């Protein structure tokens, strides 16, 4: 955690607090505009690590892994697991099934069978896959604290987990008033930035990491980006990636390489960005327009598509 020296308070300067750490195999940054709330930073970091330890499919003893290994269709789960599964069902309905966490078998078949940094090129080629089953087969019983799913079906929270975690972290920081939570590009910006204005967020360029396509100004909003150019790997000389088209069971080939979406909650921005990328330029923009979620799509040819409500702070440029 990096804090400005307390002596600066005597000079009438605004003191900020910030904490940086690694989680979900990405960089996480928490920024507060008022150092007096800095005691919350440790709580937020602890939550992120706890969330990962419980819901990562790559950890053999996580609650998600144990659920996927269940020996009976219905098993007892924690209240947190029930809440996350309820969010999955809501987003499944909200996206018409484009978001579906029952893609673990498809991810593994595509080569994403280990934590990303452990993936290696393989000579195995992609083969036809069966689309995942409808998530309506998942049944939750809050009164009994159980979740039921047919044996053999397994879940992956990669499409929703970071957004969900960012929203929960934001709830832990609410009393601080103004803050920024950034988990590898899944961002929630609350209140005002240290300079008193809106938080300004760079929209990253999927073709040239470290550069930006645009800048947006946010307050009490979330933004998330999905790329096919970041988490990808080689299979038989061809690139594969982690965004599964639930209509085919294969990595999406939509002509979109990057999607950035703004929403009131990070979980929606996260899920909608992935869905828009999977659906492609025309259907992706229509999908976002129908849900009132401003978005920017980067196409394979370098061109850019935006929704009508995209709040650009500077002119768009091509990749």
Image (cartoon, helix red, strand yellow):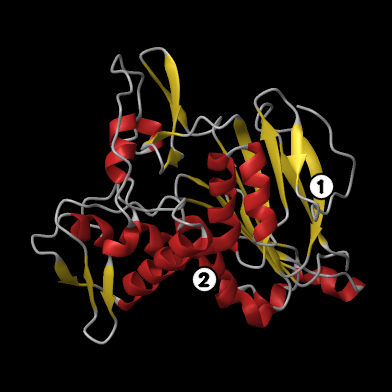
User: On the image, which quarter does residue 269 sit in?
Assistant: bottom right
On the image, numbered disc 1 is attached to which residue? 215
- Judging depth in this view, the residue of 178 and 126 nearest the camera is 126
Q: Determine whether 272 is above or below 282 in the image.
A: below
Q: Which residue is drawn at 46% across and 39% down?
A: 243
Q: Determine whether 184 is above or below 93 in the image.
A: above
Tell which circle, 2 or 1, labels the residue nearer the N-terminal end. 2
Determine the residue located farthest toward the bottom in the rendered image: 143
Mark 2 closeness class: few <14, some 14–19, many ≥20 residues within 10 Å:
some
> In the rendered picture of this protein, how many numbered marks are placed on residues?
2
On the image, numbered disc 2 is attached to which residue? 168
Q: Determine whether 309 is above or below 78 in the image.
A: above
Mark 1 closeness class: few <14, some 14–19, many ≥20 residues within 10 Å:
some
Q: Is mark 2 on a helix, strand or loop?
A: helix
Q: Distance between the residues labelled 2 and 1?
A: 25 Å
Q: State the image coordinates of residue 193 (x, y, percent, origin top left).
A: 81, 65
The answer to whether marks 2 and 1 mark residues whose Cβ atoms lie closer than 8 Å is no
Q: State the image coordinates of residue 16 (x, y, percent, origin top left).
A: 75, 66
- Judging depth in this view, the residue of 269 and 189 nearest the camera is 269
């Amino acid at each position: 955690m990096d804090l400005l020296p307390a002596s600066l308070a005597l000079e009438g300067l605004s003191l900020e607090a910030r904490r940086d750490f690694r989680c979900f195999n990405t960089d996480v940054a928490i920024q507060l505009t008022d150092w007096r709330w800095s005691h919350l930073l440790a709580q937020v970091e602890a939550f992120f690590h706890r969330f990962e330890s419980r819901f990562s499919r790559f950890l053999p003893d996580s609650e998600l892994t144990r659920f996927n290994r269940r020996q009976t269709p219905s098993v007892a789960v924690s209240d947190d697991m029930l809440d996350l599964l309820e969010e999955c069902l809501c987003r499944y309905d909200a996206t018409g099934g484009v978001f579906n966490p029952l893609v673990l078998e498809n991810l593994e078949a595509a080569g994403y069978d280990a934590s990303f940094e452990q993936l290696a090129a393989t000579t195995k080629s992609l083969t036809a896959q069966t689309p995942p089953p409808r998530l309506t087969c998942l049944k939750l019983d809050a009164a009994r604290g159980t979740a039921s799913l047919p044996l053999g079906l397994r879940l992956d929270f990669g499409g929703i987990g970071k957004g969900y975690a960012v929203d929960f972290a934001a709830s832990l920081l609410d009393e601080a008033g103004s803050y920024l939570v950034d988990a590898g590009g899944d961002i929630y910006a609350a209140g005002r930035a240290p300079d008193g204005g809106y938080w300004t967020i760079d929209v990253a360029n999927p073709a040239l990491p470290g550069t930006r396509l645009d800048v947006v100004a946010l307050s009490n909003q979330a933004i998330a980006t999905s790329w096919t150019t970041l988490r990808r790997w080689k299979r038989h000389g061809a690139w594969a990636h982690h965004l599964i088209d639930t209509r085919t069971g294969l990595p999406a080939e939509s002509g979109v390489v990057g999607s950035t979406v703004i929403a009131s909650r990070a979980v929606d921005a996260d899920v909608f960005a992935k869905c828009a990328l999977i659906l492609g330029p025309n259907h992706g923009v229509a999908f976002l327009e129908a849900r009132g979620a401003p978005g920017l799509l980067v196409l394979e040819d370098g061109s850019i598509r935006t929704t009508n409500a995209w709040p650009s702070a500077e002119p768009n440029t091509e990749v």
